[in-house]
Image: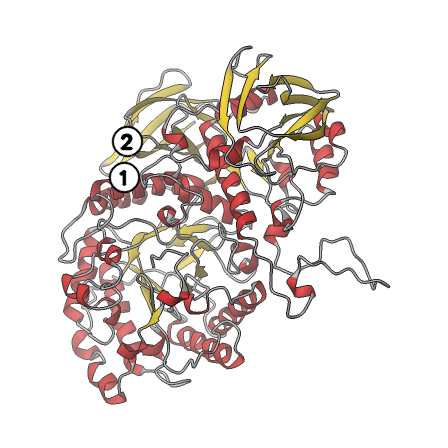
Amino acid sequence: MRHNPRRGLTEVRTLCFCLLISAQVLAAQSPKPTHERADQPANSRLPEVHLDGHYFVRDGKRFIPVGAHWVPAKAAMQWPMEWDPKDIEADFAKMHQLGYSIVRLDMLWAWFEPRPGDYNPGAFQQLDYLVSLAHKYQIYLHPSLFIGGEVGEAYWDVPWRHGRHPHADPDMLHLETNLAAEFGRHYANESAIIAWDLTDEPPFWIVDGQTSDAMAINWTRLIVDGIRQYDKLHPIVVGTSGQETSHGPFRADDIAQFVDFFSVHPFTLYAPDLFPDALLSARGTYGAAFEIALSQGVGRPVMIHEMGASTAQFSPERVAAYDRAQIYSGLGTGSIGVDLWCYTDASPAQFHKAPYLRTPQETGWGMTTWDRQDKPLAKEFEKLSQIVGRLDLTGISPSPADIGIVIPDEWAKPHGDFSHFGLSGPEVVPYVSLADADAIPGRPQPDASAANRWLMSSALTTFIIARRAGLKADFPREYADWAKRPMLFMPSPITSTGDPFLTHVHSDFYEKARKYVENGGFLYASVASDGAIPEMASLFGARLVDRAISSEITLKFVAPFGDFKPGDTLHYIVPSATTESWGTLLEVTTGKIIAVDQDGHPALVANTLGSGKTLLSAYPLEHYLAGVPAVFDKPEYTHRIYAGFRDWAGVKPVFHADRPTVEVSTLNGDRRGYVVVVNHSDQTENVKISTTIPARAVTRVSPEGSKPITMDGPSWRIDLGPYEGAIVEWKQ
């Protein structure tokens, strides 16, 4: 579904009236299996699919399913009631032609359960027919259950909900669990289903802002248990959109123990706080990779579920380029599949009624026109399908990260969890925090949205700058295994203090960080004027003195660092007169000043501790860049600081491009693997890729096959058009 998350609930309108039909109509419109089933050629049944921890597997071979969400052009969300088997089969034939291997579709709740506990046999017969089409056209089904919001601002309610909360009301939970079990009972052994999606984009908009972490956790556990009562075969996901970046209750950290994989819906155009850019931009085309990496930090594989833009708002060519760059960037990060929004535009006949009547942008999201003509995205998708179909993923896994960007425990844990607070046993005087609503019954949860935006925008900026410096970044949680990374990055506000606490690490983190550095780790941190690092001088060779208030910052290098020479400068605009934007005055102890600010005060301080090194910025550089529109679409050189630290630390990426605009990521196996390169700029690039391993041959994977690339020692060159991606296989 596509929607602007800032819409008020006043815009949400339930359309359940179109689902309130009599039992006689249900029976009259049910499909007749003996006449309407698709013919199934011999031996055409789809093989069962499972997850092996990294990728989907069928017939013992890994594969990356690709496709899109299906909402028919003519009937739209009324397709179960306006049942047209011939038109539906024509859609499947077209999707097969485009190379689909997966299609996600909606199980309208009110159609399957028109009355509480009373299931519509006609709805299951329709799903049986879709299963037969899946086998015939070799396209796996990915059903999404309990559809609430889908298509713009619409909410597809059940007529018998009567205002009850679908994530909290006991009766609703009981009914939802039973329906999930019914799906599991019907299709426990059906190989045409690749996975169950518990629902699309929770929390449902009709109860937006009313779902807590505990509700999301309990709901997910119950629905999964309902399916697993009968179905042990199919992987399970919850189709979430922006739950990680918005710190929503269905974020990966809350539901990880119940689901088999995660999904992301990286609609960057609906997140201007994180992506203040044009649709087709460097920052925007990193959206999928960023959300995938953020979710992967909890230890599950991740799939791109929905992504795209409407050609009612953007040119078809730019939409195609936007999706293409994001898909390749996501695949390089480790995405296990791609399922775009969506297959087709809406028919003009739909423009006259809600929801399309009220949401003109929803009419043009398809990769085909309503009458099945290819748009530019369809042509790009067909080539992508052929390329990923040629990949041999045996023994392949995403490369480990060079940089860990630490996600604070207070952000990751469920709200109200005191497990890492250092308290043990009964307390004579109990600890109660005003910041934890769950500790005080009836107290509303504090609004942490501004703090979350601060953290996420800084994390996104760091992620992109790292990529521009040739470094892969991921997001280990504070109490996870971050010490395995060669480098650790802590951009402000991770180094901050204050309320709410979700933006910064705990005080005792720095004891662990000091041991990490002493044992050979490399730690970078930036601080703002609200920073607080216990015993800071022993770690960074400098300590905080006071706030440094300025509206503009100029860093002047006074010592060689990376490719910086003394006298080189970098310039930044301070976005606001607030403590999170001001810098700090530093007093240097054992550290070495690398750069000073416009007033001659220390701005970058390098320090050696044990076998490791640290680099400290007195200003929150990542925060400054986060709010600058189109900042990476013009010359920007902060990545040279990261690259300088990389070189000083001696961290050498296995594959590296000579252009910061070209992202390089790797999928590694035993003496072979794939390099995924993405041009995040609007210029054609002839880029040089260099490697530190003895690769003897490289070939570019194309729709037609593999094309050898001539190597020049440990490097080769490749041409990439604007926002183009490519996959290169390497062998030792």
Q: Quadrant of the N terminus?
A: bottom left
Residue indicated by mark 2? 722
* Residue shown at 38% from the left, 28% from the top: 661
In the image, taking residue 490 as reference, residue 244 lies left or right, namely: left
Q: Could you tell me residue 687's position as x and y percent?
A: 34, 22
Give whichever of 172, 65 is nearer the camera.
172
Q: Amino acid at mark 2?
A: Pro
In the image, taking residue 523 as reference, residue 627 lies left or right, namely: left
The quarter of the picture where residue 324 lies is top left
Q: Amino acid at mark 1?
A: Ala
Q: Could you tell me residue 327's position as x and y percent?
A: 35, 43
Q: Does 314 appear above or below 432?
A: above
* Residue shown at 16% from the left, 54% from the top: 369
Could you tell me if residue 19 is visible in this image?
yes
User: Is label 2 in contact with label 1 (beta carbons under 8 Å)?
Assistant: yes
Give whichever of 11, 382 is nearer the camera.
11
As measured in the structure, the alpha-carbon distance from the residue carrying label 2 to the one carrying label 1 is: 8 Å
Could you tell me if residue 60 is visible in this image?
no
Q: Could you tell me residue 307's position as x and y percent?
A: 34, 50
Q: Could you tell me residue 68's position as x and y percent?
A: 29, 55
Mark with earlier residue (2, 1): 1
Which class describes the residues within 10 Å of circle 2: few (<14), some (14-19), or many (20+)?
some
Classify mark 2: helix, strand or loop.
Answer: loop
Q: Does 97 appear above or below 347?
A: above
Give whichever of 261, 701 is nearer the camera.
261
* Residue shown at 44% from the left, 41% from the top: 333
Classify mark 1: helix, strand or loop.
Answer: helix
In the image, taking residue 147 as reference, residue 398 lies left or right, namely: right
Disc marking residue 321: 1
The quarter of the picture where residue 48 lies is bottom left
Outermost top residue: 566
